[in-house]
Amino acid sequence: MELFGLAMEQLYLSTLIIAGALTVLYVFFGDIADGGEGLPFFNPTVILAFFTLAAATGYLLEIGTGLSDMAIIGISLATAVLLDFLLYFFVLLPLSSAEASIAYTEESLLGQVARVIIPIPVNGYGEVVMETYGGMIAKRATGYDNEAIGQDEQVLVIDVKDNTLYVRAYEPVNFGDKK
């Protein structure tokens, strides 16, 4: 069978190459073309994956089996729909919700313990680093009561204003020692 003047093998392979190339371009330039939140199955990732999967399945069935062309088209479309569905619900949806989960707010830093990496002078600014669930965060800091705090000391975040942490020296309470 021929379609558009091409043998089916050539049509599947051409579609696979074009859809694969567009997928690579979308990976690099997808943020520019992002249309926001629309219908999930009109997402370019889902559409490109459908054509890539359908063409790959069709090509493999065409060269590897003796099935009729109509059976191969049906099997490849059904396989592409199934794999596209699995890709969307088990890969793309979890990834889209994971992006928002690594962010932090300045208010979430209140009460955190940090380590001074640039000493904080009297009435001046230094820098502290703290470990959060999203990784290491370095922020500008100043003494809550304008006190000096040395390097490698632990501090407690008391307040956050204008992207600056107001900190005090932190002394952990050890309930095991009785003096």
Image (cartoon, grey):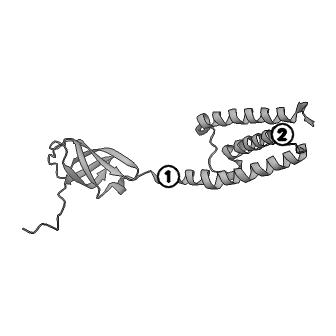
Q: CA distance from mark 2 to mark 1?
A: 43 Å
Say if residue 39 shows up in the picture. no
Q: Residues within 10 Å of mark 2 (few under 14, many from 20)?
A: some
Q: Amino acid at mark 2?
A: Glu
| Residue shown at 78% from the left, 35% from the top | 15
For mark 2, what is the residue? 62
Label tally: 2
Q: Nearer the viewer, residue 159 or 139?
A: 139
Which quarter of the figure is the N terminus placed in?
Answer: top right
Q: Is residue 138 above or below residue 78?
A: above
Towards the viewer: 79 or 125: 79
- The x, y position of residue 134, in whole percent, is 41, 50
Residue positioned most to the right: 1
Residue type beneath disc 1: Ala
Helix, strand or loop for disc 2: helix
Q: Earlier in the sequence, mark 2 or mark 1?
A: 2
The extreme front residue here reads: 65
Q: Residue at x 69, y 32 (%)?
A: 21
The residue that mark 1 highlights is 100
Residue 163 visible in the displayed image: yes
Mark 2 against mark 1, which lies toward the viewer?
2
Q: Which dot marks residue 148?
A: none
At horizontal 62% and vertical 55% (from top left) the residue drawn is: 90
Left-right relation of 2 to 36: right
The kind of secondary structure element at disc 1 is helix
